Image: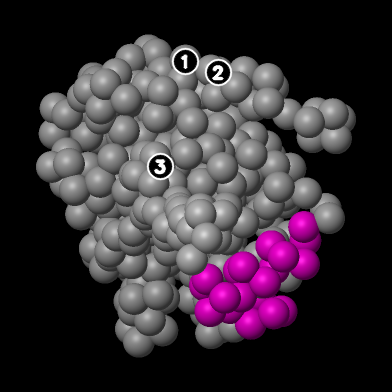
Amino acid sequence: MSIFLSRRLASLLTVCCLGFIAPAALAQALSAIRLNTFPNATNLALYYGLAHGVFERHGIALDLRFTPNSEAQRDGLARGEFEMAYSAVDNAVAMVELARENVVIVSGGDSSMNEFMVRPEIRTLEDLRGRTLVVDRPETAYALQAKKVLRRAGLLPGRDYQLRAIGATIPRIEAMQADATNAMAMLNPPFTFVARERGLKSFGRFTDLVGPYQGGGLFVMRRWARAHGEVLERFLAAYIESTRLALAPAQRAEAERLLVTRLKQTPAVATQTLEILLAPGFGLAPDARFDLAGFREVLSLRAEVEGQWGGVAPSPERYYDLSWYDNALARLARTASPEQSR
């Protein structure tokens, strides 16, 4: 064999070997993030980012995990079973106040998109006297929302109605169907549409009944955020970008497809769900922004309904830190193409 052919063969072998090594090297370069959440429509941006490689482009290998209830999520985050949690930010407040865990909220995401759902025979809130409110857990955010709605009607837990902890959403709907005593629940999409298909009805959106509310958001252990600030910023940049893309009018068909495949929805329900997600002030927050006025309502609910802090809500600043979020926005602005920045 000639020297030229030998060198040529060596070069080809080197290219082939690099072809096998490159994916492994790329995987090693990605920062692994385990994110725990509920399997619902508020995760549309996460689904989009995973499906279209947005997180990988920002150097993040995202492992999306689902929780059966808020308690499991809180405990798992505190034990280090995952780095991030996305759910009602009231869970972060509960971790700080009840479990004494140093948790910090790093972004917003949605208004909770909750509706107060009841059995078909219920005509007024007074009809709920003597009935049962089914909840994930009695002290969690959306249970407090329901208590607030009932409190405004003069109904108090233990005196006028009972609470029953069921856990995940579908079991709560099934409990309402199976037993007329289980007459009410707070539900969000796509489960509000499932509930309607099964004969339940809505008494209104929480934001219409009460006012602005900071529902879902991202929260992490503060010590992890301080030790991994650059990774957190890259994740938030990917999450913000994924939110922009998922909510873009040009991506509507893809967004509906993801809701169908990820949540096992019918196309009709996916279309209805996306309408809710796109609703200004009620659906997903643009750029996953944190709503400070809505977060003040979160704290006010705990103070008023649960009697925490002597009935006076504390300053909200102790529970959130948006410095990583702001840095992520700046990172996106530096890297955006002219088309993206328009």
Report the quarter where the C terminus lies: top right
Apparent side of residue 125 relative to residue 335 in the rendered image (left or right):
left
Decide: few, some or many residues near mark 3? Use Cα within 10 Å; few <14, some 14-19, many ≥20.
Answer: some
Q: Position of residue 48 (x, y in %)?
A: 60, 56
Inspect the image, locate mark 2, and give the three-letter code of the amino acid beneath it. Asp
Q: Which residue is nearer to you in this view: 195 or 64?
A: 64
Residue 252: quadrant of the picture: bottom right
Question: Which SS class for mark 1?
Answer: helix
Apparent side of residue 200 relative to residue 285 in the rendered image (left or right):
left
Give the image's coloring scheme: one colour
Residue 313: quadrant of the picture: top left
Q: CA distance from mark 3 to mark 1?
A: 23 Å
Q: Which residue is nearer to you in this view: 259 or 301?
A: 259
Q: Position of residue 225 (x, y in %)?
A: 31, 24
Residue assigned mark 2 = 326
Closer to viewer: mark 3 or mark 2: 3
Residue assigned mark 1 = 323
Q: Position of residue 227 (x, y in %)?
A: 26, 21
Span shown in magenta? 251-269
Pick whichever of labels 3 and 2 is earlier in the sequence.
3
Inspect the image, locate mark 3, and give the three-letter code of the amino acid beneath it. Leu
Inspect the image, locate mark 1, and give the three-letter code of the amino acid beneath it. Ser
Residue name at image x 74 percent, y 43 percent? 280
Which mark is drawn over residue 30?
A: 3
